[in-house]
């Protein structure tokens, strides 16, 4: 097979693709868009595959691998695509198990085992085991999206690897497909090695090297874990295959061991001067057998504070770094007592004990988001994996960290260190200047590998070697051990078709890097990309692939990514869209720039909900990128029909207001409604929103100024509230008056331009926003707070306004004066009325992403309301769910989210501030939603 590069993937012959499609049909996808989004994982590497297979059954996988072997096509297996080392990218055929082969087949509480398919997500397994008081022990921070197959591939550990061991210690047996096309059962015991012909003889021949080179300490994950094959270790073939990174075959099914849940663990949070000093204390704490012992850098916490405010961080002891020691016990009280014992045994300068509860959860979330949060250094530079998870014996950890910091300083690099300190495992993202090439990274990695080896350590402590570290294995293994690994792979993959270039016969660590090939693209006349210094390329490369967008928000309380939850298609995740944009910037495969069909196919189902800007720890804002893409694509060109109709909806609403009775009549006649919706570029199954008899601006209230002596506010009535829901600003006015405010109504014409922004009409949007600044800013300078009542419009003035008008100081001044209805009412000295309602709340995505929902929670609590929050998007998202081609996805998002919640809580009234959210509820289920202002006003009247 000829040598290839990332831009020139392995040429899959028509004979191979014909054979594959002949057997597996549409499970095989060789489209340009799919190949683009699978070109990388969570690593620095980029290799465009020839095709992607999404199998439904074990038989599909066996068929594909046998055909690939026959045609000499390399095969790479992939789970959640969260590999930091490039383990899950490769040329030829990529097999993605996460789409269909993702079930937990059974849980047996008697034997404390579970049977899983390789694509089963760890958090799904944990949820299935929880009713039996069980869990899977290893728990990497990517638990909400990493798959069991990926964990087995990398021998993952996580924080609780300290108490429950590595994945290799928790696998009972596996159904395994070798590279030679044979299906075997991999287990342990006297006859286990007989499953692979020649393996018994291999062990007998290599006894000395297996005993001296492998398994020297717990986190020696680099290379193959061949020590498990030894007779004194139970001849455990399953454990030996764990951590082979897809280079020795394919997992088809696994039986895994489960462990009891800790009832109510408490945290001892220990503060130290710095991370190295914290590491020095680890050996003193290990005798107390903590369930987890994590290191957390103060700079990482500062990133969270800057992004989300002090409220996102629990009270922490003083220090430049912390150890988080989790203590267990039969009861919560026993766990707290054990945590205090850890504090007493430590040499910490300060400490705090957190019992199980919200504060402990918030601290764990910071730790879980570490890979994304550490994607920016303290100076704000992009940081990358590469030296992601080195490990040394815990007693050497402090000295190793000092050496690592000194090495970074010598190489002119920086990064944040954190990780599983109880196991001696260090995570680090480092600001390699990959935009200029891979040479600086190579220089550092070669020296870092030598440093780790000097301390008796491993290049990888849980993520595997992949393309980042396999070339460096001679630093820690002697030639005999390297030959043994080659022999072992040959027994299982004689034709070297399984993930070639990883572990054995490794690829160069600086080959196929993604970032150096990306062309520099600057902001122009659209968004400023201010957070990234006006550099579109840096902005798009914020996505390093941590994959949080693939997690089901219903299980973690977030909103990202609604279209992926509906389709489970990688191209519809935030990460998939970022990959398509990155490929556009590379230009080697996606070649038509902003006009590339691959870009628009990937962006098509983005709802522009902005949830990624908050939920993704890297801070990527796909809504902004989509708007910019549409702006540049259609500059000076004819646009989509919906851009002229839905994208300019405020203008149409003003024109149609006098014709409200006729429009409403047409909306009640099915054939007329369908015709009108089709002519507007909308899906004909959608309802035509009814127009009120009078917009708010026609009412006497719109011209009223109330001269109270209280806080001075400007009630900004946006286009949607004015023309479609005038009762809401009337109720808002009533509430603000009751709160003693001096209220003035903003003059008509102050529009945020949201529909223009979401359809990429940024030139028109900027003109609209300049008018809005001119209209509202004088009131701000007169001391008034601007109160927004439509969440999406309010969020636009708080965020997009300054991105679109970065050179206008008035824009920033206005943005700083805009508040939501709840933010304002909770900031003044006013006692709200009691309502005592049972509410199901659907927060608007922009409200959640830009302003946060805590002020609303506080107001509702003060009113005595019982509140249930529905996580995730409603699915309509302004023009998205109205447009042709989006109806099914929009409806599925709603049915899987708010509509399911509503059916399960028929006693709760629905609160939905967003006009689009209320429209979706009414359109799909005939449910009424109310605005917060209406709830408060009703309570006042009672």
Image (cartoon, grey):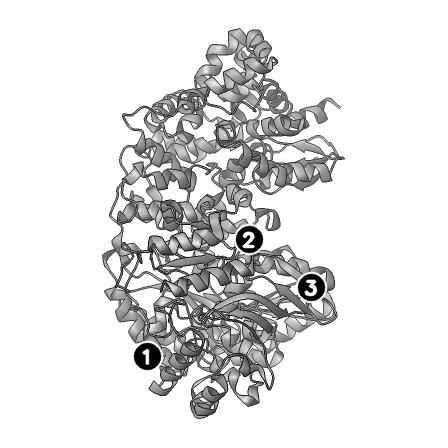
Q: Residue at x 44, y 92 (%)?
A: 208
Check if mark 3's residue and mark 1's residue have beta carbons within 8 Å.
no
Task: Give the secondary structure at mark 1.
Answer: helix
Instruction: Relative to 815, say whether 32 is above or below.
Output: below
Q: Earlier in the sequence, mark 3 or mark 1?
A: 3
Instruction: Relative to 216, say whether 798 is above or below.
Output: above
Instruction: Specify the label residue 107 is tagged with.
Output: 3
The residue that label 2 is drawn on is 100
Q: Residue at x 32, y 35 (%)?
A: 806
Select label 1 or label 2 by which is in front. 2
Q: Earlier in the sequence, mark 1 or mark 2?
A: 2
Q: CA distance from mark 3 to mark 1?
A: 44 Å
Select label 2 or label 3 by which is in front. 2
- Residue 274, given in percent of the width and then of the height, sits at 44, 69
Left or right of 158 in this view: 434 = left
Quadrant, the C terminus: top right
The residue that label 1 is drawn on is 450
- Residue 927, given in percent of the width and then of the height, sits at 68, 28
Label 3 packing within 10 angstroms: few (<14), some (14-19), many (20+): many
Label 2 packing within 10 angstroms: few (<14), some (14-19), many (20+): some
Left or right of 166 in this view: 644 = left
Instruction: Relative to 685, say whether 14 is above or below.
Output: below
């Amino acid at each position: 097979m000829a040598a290839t590069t990332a831009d020139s993937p392995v040429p899959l012959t028509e004979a191979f693709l014909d054979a594959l499609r002949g057997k597996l049909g549409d499970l095989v996808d060789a489209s340009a868009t799919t190949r683009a989004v699978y070109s990388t994982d969570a690593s620095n590497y980029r290799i465009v595959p020839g095709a992607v297979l999404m199998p439904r059954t074990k038989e599909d996988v066996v068929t594909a691998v046998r055909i690939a072997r026959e045609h000499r096509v390399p095969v790479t297996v992939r789970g959640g695509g969260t590999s930091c080392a490039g383990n899950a990218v490769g040329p030829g055929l990529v097999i993605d198990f996460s789409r269909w082969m993702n079930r937990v087949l059974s849980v047996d509480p008697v034997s404390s085992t579970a049977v899983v398919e390789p694509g089963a997500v760890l958090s799904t397994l944990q949820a299935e085991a929880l009713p039996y008081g069980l869990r899977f022990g290893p728990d990497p921070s990517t638990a909400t999206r990493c798959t069991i197959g990926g964990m087995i591939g990398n021998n993952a550990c996580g924080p609780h690897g300290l108490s429950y061991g590595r994945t290799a210690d928790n696998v009972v047996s596996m159904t395994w497909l070798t590279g030679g096309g044979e299906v075997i059962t991999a287990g342990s015991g006297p006859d286990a090695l007989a499953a692979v012909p020649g393996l018994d003889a291999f062990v007998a021949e290599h006894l000395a090297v297996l005993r001296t080179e492998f398994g020297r300490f717990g986190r020696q994950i680099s290379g193959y874990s061949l020590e498990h094959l030894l007779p004194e270790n139970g001849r455990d073939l399953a454990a030996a295959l764990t951590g082979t990174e897809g280079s020795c075959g394919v997992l088809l099914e696994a039986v895994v061991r489960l462990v009891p849940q800790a009832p109510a663990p408490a945290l001892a949070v220990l503060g130290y001067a710095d991370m190295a000093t914290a590491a020095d204390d680890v050996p003193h704490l290990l005798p107390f057998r903590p369930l987890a012992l994590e290191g957390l850098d103060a700079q990482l916490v500062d990133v969270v504070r800057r992004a989300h405010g002090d409220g996102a961080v629990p009270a922490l002891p003083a220090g430049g770094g912390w150890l988080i020691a989790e203590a267990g016990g039969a009861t919560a009280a026993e766990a707290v007592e054990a945590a205090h014992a850890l504090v007493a045994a430590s040499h910490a300068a300060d400490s705090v004990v957190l019992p199980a509860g919200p504060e402990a959860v918030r601290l764990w979330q910071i730790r879980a988001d570490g890979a994304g949060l550490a994607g920016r250094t303290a100076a704000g530079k992009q940081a990358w994996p590469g030296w992601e998870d080195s490990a040394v014996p815990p007693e050497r950890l402090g000295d190793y960290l000092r050496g690592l910091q000194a090495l970074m300083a010598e190489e002119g690099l920086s990064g944040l260190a954190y990780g599983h300190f109880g196991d001696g495992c260090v995570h680090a993202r480092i600001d390699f200047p990959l935009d200029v090439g891979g040479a600086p990274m190579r220089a550092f990695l070669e020296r870092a590998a030598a440093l780790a080896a000097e301390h008796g350590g491993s290049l990888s402590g849980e993520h595997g070697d992949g393309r980042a570290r396999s070339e460096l294995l001679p630093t820690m293994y002697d030639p005999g051990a390297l030959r043994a690994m080659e022999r072992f792979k040959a027994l299982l993959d004689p034709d070297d078709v399984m993930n070639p270039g990883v572990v054995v016969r490794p690829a160069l660590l600086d080959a196929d890097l993604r970032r150096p090939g990306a062309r520099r693209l600057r902001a122009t006349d659209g968004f400023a990309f201010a957070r990234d210094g006006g550099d579109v390329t840096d902005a798009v490369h914020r996505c390093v692939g941590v994959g949080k967008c693939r997690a089901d928000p219903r299980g973690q309380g977030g909103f990202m990514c609604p279209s992926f939850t509906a389709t489970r298609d990688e191209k519809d995740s935030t990460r998939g869209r970022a990959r398509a944009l990155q490929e556009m910037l590379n230009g080697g495969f996606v070649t038509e720039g902003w006009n590339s069909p691959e870009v628009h196919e990937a962006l098509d189902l983005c709802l522009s909900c902005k949830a990624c800007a908050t939920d993704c720890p890297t801070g990527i804002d796909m809504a902004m990128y989509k708007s910019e893409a549409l702006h540049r694509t259609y500059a000076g060109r004819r646009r989509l029909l919906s851009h002229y109709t839905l994208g300019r909806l405020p203008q149409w609403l003003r024109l149609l207001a006098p014709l409200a009775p006729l429009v409403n009549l047409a909306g009640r006649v099915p054939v007329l409604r369908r015709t009108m919706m089709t002519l507007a570029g909308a899906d004909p199954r959608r309802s035509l929103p009814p127009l009120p008899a009078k917009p708010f601006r026609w009412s006497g209230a719109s011209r009223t100024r109330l001269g109270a002596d209280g806080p001075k506010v400007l009630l900004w009535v946006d286009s949607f509230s004015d023309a479609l829901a005038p009762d809401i600003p009337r109720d808002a006015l009533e509430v603000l008056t009751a709160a003693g405010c001096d209220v003035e109504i903003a003059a008509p014409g102050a529009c945020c331009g949201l529909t223009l922004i979401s359809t990429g009409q940024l030139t028109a949007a900027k003109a609209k926003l300049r008018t809005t600044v001119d209209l509202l800013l004088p009131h701000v300078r007169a001391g008034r707070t601007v109160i927004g009542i439509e969440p999406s419009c309010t969020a636009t003035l708080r965020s997009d306004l300054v991105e679109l008008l970065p050179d206008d100081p008035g824009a920033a001044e206005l943005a700083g004066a805009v508040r939501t209805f709840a933010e304002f009412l909770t900031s003044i000295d006013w006692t709200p009325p009691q309502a005592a309602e049972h509410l199901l709340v659907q927060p608007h995505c922009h409200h959640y992403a830009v302003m946060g929902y805590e002020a609303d929670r506080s107001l509702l609590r003060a009113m005595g309301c019982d509140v249930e929050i529905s996580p995730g998007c409603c699915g309509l998202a302004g023009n998205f769910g109205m447009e042709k081609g989006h109806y099914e996805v929009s409806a599925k998002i709603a049915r899987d989210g708010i509509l399911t919640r509503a059916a399960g809580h028929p006693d709760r009234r629905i609160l939905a501030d967003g006009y689009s959210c209320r429209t979706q509820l009414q359109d799909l289920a005939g449910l009424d939603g109310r605005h917060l202002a209406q709830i408060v006003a009703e309570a006042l009247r009672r």
